[in-house]
Each structure stands twice: as C-alpha cells, then as structure tokens.
Amino acid sequence: MDSSMRGGCVEPSCKVIKVNPGEIKLVERFDAESFRSFLQNRLDLGEFCFSLTSLRKLSHFLRQGRPFKGVFVKEEKGLFLADLLEEESPVYGLAIDLGSTTIAFYLYDFERDAVLEESSILNPQTKYGEDILMRLHLARKREKLEEIRLETLEAINQEIERLNGERIYYVSLCGNTAMSHFLLGLPVNYLILEPYPPVAKWYGVSRSIEVEFKIHPEGRVFIFPSAGAYFGGDLIAGLFFVELYKKDAPCFFIDVGTNAEVVLGNKDFLLACAGAAGPALEGGIFSAGCRAEPGAIYKVYINRASNQVYFETLGGHPPKCMCGSAIIDLMAQLFKEGVLSPEGKLIKESWRERVIETDEGEAFLVYEDGQRRILIKEPEIKAFIRSKGAMFCILSLLCEKSGLSFEDVEKFYFAGSFGVNINVSSAVMLG
C-alpha cells in the first residue's frame, strides 16, 4: 500500500498534497486552471483530472483562506483529484488479502505512513466448501456465482464500514485467481478445464462503484494481477514485497494457505509450482486440525519430565483445535523426544501417560478437560508424513528444473496465514 511496496517497484497509489490558498493567484479564466497551474508549476505535479466532487468544493476552498489538502489517487492513465478536504481530515487506504479461508484487512494512514489497524474475518465462501475446486464447480452456474460474489462483497463491506469507509480512498486487494474471479463476478467455467485459462491477467484500477466497495465514492480499487490459474495476485503481491526478482542468489518464496504456491528464483529467473497444502493440516487429515481461528492452538511446547503439554491459543481463548503451525511444532518435538519414530509410529513406552489407545490405534493426548479431548492419531501422523513428502516434491522439482540443489538456495520466504505462525526450527527438524 505504501509508495515503495518495500522496494520502489510501485508508484504511490495515493498522494495527499497540502495547499495554502494564499499562495495561489486566481489569474486564469477558470478556478480549476488556476489551481492546476499552481500545482504543476510549484509542485511539479504533472497532468491530472478533476473529480466532480473536487470541482464542487474548489472555488470555496480557494477563497476561504485556510490551508486545505487535495487527495490524488493513481489511475492507469495518471493522477485523479478525488477530493478536497479540510486540513485535519484523515486520508486512509486499505489493503485486503482475500484468502480462501480468511480475509485480512490493513487500514493505512497515507499521511502518517502507518498501519492503523489490522483485522481479519472468516471468508463466507467456506460454507460452500473448504476446497476451492468445490466452489468453482458450484459457481459454473451463473446464479451461484452471483450468490458467492454478493456474500463475499457483503462480508468485505461490513468490515470496510467498521473501518470508516468514507475516509478510504484507495484499496489494494490481492487474492488467488479464483478469489479474484469470484469477487469480480467473472465466469469461472474454464478455470477448471484444461488449459485452465483465467478471464484476464490484468484487472486494472477500478472505480469503487464498479467493484461495489463502500469506500469514498471517488475512491479507486486495484486488484493485483494473476500470472495464471494457480498463480494469483496474492503470489504476485508477495513476490513484490520480498523483491524476489531482485535477488542475486536463488531463494524460495512459499505461500502456504489452503493451497501452496512455491516460486524459486532470483533476478535471472522465476519458476513456480502449485499444489494442495493447508487442508492437510486444517482438518483434511487431522481430526483435531483447524484453520487459524480464535481458540486454535498455534504453538506447542512439551515437557516429558513433568508430563505437561504447554501451548498458546489464538486470542487467548480456551483450546478447541490445532492449526498447522502447532501440528508442525508437536510433530517436531515428539520426534526430538523419541516419542515419534521416523516412520510416524508413536512409541508408547516413551510416554505412557500421553500415548493412549483409541479405536483408530494409538494417539497422542494434547489436551483434555471434562468436555473435550484433543488427540493426534497415528494414522493421521502417517498421512501428514505423506503430505509433507508431496510438499518436498514440489521443492525438489523446482530445484531439478532449474538445475540447482538445496545448498544453492540462500533463503526461504514464507507467507500466508500458516507462514505467519510457523516455527522455522520445527519445520527444519521435520525436513
């Protein structure tokens, strides 16, 4: 959202220019031309267009004697004067990460160059299925696509209104290709048919009324472009953020959410691969698994000597399930303590109080109270090992195709809700 995108690759999406009307000479035939001449000559602003909202206020602001400010937003064709405001009025932007499971919001103050608030909500699309393919199949019917679009839009707008939407002048939104299609109401019929063509790569900068976001009426919405059916705007935004395309040494960028997108590259090349990932940890394999939500255990520490399992939950709520980062923590520590064999077998003799018998075989007892037991079962662990192997295959394939070894890779960058909480040492221990 800021002017550099952490690397100077994107121009500012919004400029706030403070103006002292006493410095402006009203010598032109039209007030708008006097204002334009002042900005272009004194501030080297360049060409811009006026909104009707700004024109309605211009003559008053030029003559009322008090400093004011102009809010300029970036369009594909150049700058656009969206509004004129009193000096103390705030000017916000909003970054939205439209994830398959979670929608994250970051409210940004353009003048203070600061993120004011972060929040997240559950993507209402999850009721149509955790699997994106399930949603895509449903959305082949036009009326179902519109239903999904409207529910997603309503959820986003409720949060926008809570964040003082009339003060938001620019929204930058990223999501995978399917999420972008759902939000914009683009047909998804061919996304599930080889060769899986999206409707478009570039969505452009849209007026807020076109996307139906309840921000300032003259606000603009930028949706990050897609590189293909499985490489969407969320991946592109991440690559911009870490500047993978500027690195000298090869690096991995791994976005792990409901799906996994992996890019290997540097300034000379970028090679990408995608596959299923998150559901294996969020309930797809583990009965105790869940997404990162309030009450989810996201960090685990074990102490065999005291027979204790310590953990932290999101929001400090009572534990009800385990998200992916906690499962990786637990697997790594059980393996380190000799409770778990390399083949995924729980060794009862190593911790009799915690390794218990169930109808599905042995399981590790993470938590128990009068109402709930959180267990990790041996068959689930073995399925996790296979899932981890699939992820390792993606990394190995990219190295093989690029003629590199893992020793040639300088850094691993993790993104996504899973990547935020992952314990790197635990991941390394599991290979």
Image (tube, rainbow, N blue to C red):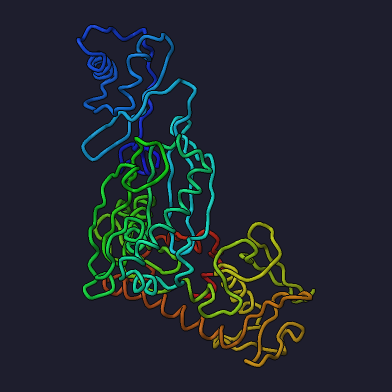
Q: Nearer the viewer, residue 91 or 398?
A: 91
Q: Is residue 191 above or below residue 63?
A: below
Label tally: 0
Report the residue at 24% width, 70% height from top.
190
View extreme (front): residue: 143
Instruction: Specify the quadrant that holds the N terminus.
Output: top left
Q: Is residue 251 visible?
A: no
Residue 261, quarter of picture? bottom left
Q: Tell me where residue 231 appears, x and y as whole percent.
A: 31, 63
Report the residue at 45% width, 20% height from top.
86
Q: Is residue 271 visible?
A: yes
Q: Tell me where residue 173 appears, x and y as whole percent.
A: 38, 50
Q: Is residue 368 above or below residue 158?
A: below
Report the residue at 25% width, 60% height from top.
269
In this rendering, position of residue 37 left or right of residue 59? left
Q: Is residue 15 above or below residue 337?
A: above
Q: Tell me where residue 365 appears, x and y as whole percent.
A: 70, 80
Q: Nearer the viewer, residue 144 or 398?
A: 144
Residue 288, quarter of picture? bottom right
In this rendering, position of residue 87 left or right of residue 196? right
Residue 52, quarter of picture? top left
Q: Tell me where residue 430 appears, x and y as whole percent.
A: 53, 75
Q: Nearer the viewer, residue 410 or 316?
A: 316
In this rendering, position of residue 62 left or right of residue 362? left
